[in-house]
């Protein structure tokens, strides 16, 4: 039954007082007027259209937002909005009536331009930039339903994998935690008297840090000022070129026979 015939029939029934027989013809079904409907009649679902790229403006690059339709059904994006939800001072763009069909791609340029109504290129007409890295973009349909969100990336930054997880590389100390102090071994500094000297003063010892790169398997730690390998074999003063060097316990080679802290004092 076409609309014209229906209206005539409704008028006739009204004249006879029988208009209650056709309540469905009194007003159209509200489902036909849902703004979130696609052209084919099915309701638009989140991510039917997604933001796949936002390029912030620069001297060398125009600023634009790229949308992509992920379903086969045509979708009219009239009344849809692109919103910068990170910064309230940034403007909102509202699309005019346009059916995204076989092309699937819509590009919204921030700067002014001349739009071709046959393709999905739109121009915001602004002289300033809308986006910067870290901004969150929202795509909403004409009813306000959130369709998709997108975070603006830094130039050259790859989008994160949906399954990727971030593992912290370090754990900072808590407010009551304290790091353990590092200890520096002390090494005696020995004042060596020249041969034939009549001085009998005891050697003075001044704490000094030891060389931190010594390998105890190569240089015995009890001889910190020279590098003498640990036993075995057992060495004597005649087996090494060093004289008058500091000795700490345990003196495994027995270089300091008089236990005064100086090894191989003679010869």
Image (cartoon, rainbow, N blue to C red):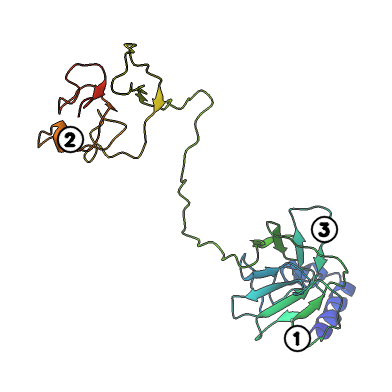
Give how far across and how far down residue 105 sits, in percent: 67, 80
Q: Earlier in the sequence, mark 3 or mark 1?
A: 3
Q: Nearer the viewer, residue 194 or 264?
A: 194
What is the total number of numbered labels drawn onto the structure image? Answer: 3
Left or right, 13 with reference to 173: right
Query: Picture quarter containing residue 44?
Result: bottom right
Q: Earlier in the sequence, mark 2 or mark 3?
A: 3
Question: Where is mark 3, residue-wise?
Answer: 90
Query: Residue at position x 68%, y 73% from top?
Result: 67
Give how far across and how far down residue 173 sits, in percent: 49, 31
Q: Nearer the viewer, residue 225 or 220?
A: 225
Q: Is residue 240 above or below residue 259?
A: below
**How packed is label 2: few (under 14 Cα within 10 Å), some, or many (20 or more)?**
some
For label 1, the SS is loop
Considering the image in quadrants, where does the N terminus appear? bottom right
Question: Where is mark 2, residue-wise?
Answer: 230
Left or right, 245 with reference to 105: left
Question: Distance between the Cα atoms at labels 2 and 3?
Answer: 74 Å
Query: Residue at position x 82%, y 86% from top?
Result: 116
Question: Where is mark 1, residue-wise?
Answer: 119
For label 3, the SS is loop
Question: Mark 2 or 3, which is nearer the eye?
Answer: 2
Q: Is residue 120 visible?
A: yes
Q: Is residue 114 above or below residue 23?
A: below
Query: Picture quarter containing residue 213?
Result: top left
Give how far across and how far down residue 52 sits, in percent: 63, 70
Query: Residue at position x 86%, y 83% from top?
Result: 114
Question: Mark 3 or 1, which is nearer the eye?
Answer: 3
């Amino acid at each position: 039954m076409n609309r014209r015939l229906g209206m005539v029939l409704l008028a006739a029934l009204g004249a006879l007082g029988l208009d209650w027989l056709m309540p469905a013809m009194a007003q159209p079904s509200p489902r036909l007027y849902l703004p979130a409907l696609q052209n084919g009649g099915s309701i638009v679902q989140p991510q039917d259209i997604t933001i796949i790229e936002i390029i912030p403006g620069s001297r060398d690059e125009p600023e634009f937002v790229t949308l992509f339709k992920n379903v086969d059904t045509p979708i009219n994006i009239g009344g849809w909005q692109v919103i910068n939800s990170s910064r309230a001072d940034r403007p909102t763009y509202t699309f005019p009536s346009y059916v995204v069909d076989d092309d699937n791609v819509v590009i919204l340029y921030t700067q002014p331009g001349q739009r071709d109504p046959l393709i999905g290129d739109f121009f915001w007409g602004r002289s300033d930039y809308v986006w910067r890295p870290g901004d969150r973009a929202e795509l909403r349909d004409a009813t306000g339903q959130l369709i998709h969100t997108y975070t603006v990336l830094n130039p050259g930054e790859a989008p994160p994998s949906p399954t990727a997880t971030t593992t912290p590389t370090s754990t900072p100390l808590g407010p009551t935690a304290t790091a353990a102090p590092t200890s520096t071994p002390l090494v005696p500094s020995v004042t060596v008297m020249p041969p034939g000297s009549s001085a009998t003063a005891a050697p003075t010892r001044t704490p000094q840090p030891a060389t931190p790169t010594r390998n105890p398997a190569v240089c015995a730690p009890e001889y910190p000022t020279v590098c003498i390998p640990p036993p075995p074999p057992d060495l004597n003063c005649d087996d090494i070129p060093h004289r008058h060097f500091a000795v700490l316990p345990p003196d495994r080679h027995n270089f300091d026979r008089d236990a005064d802290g100086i090894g191989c004092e003679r010869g």
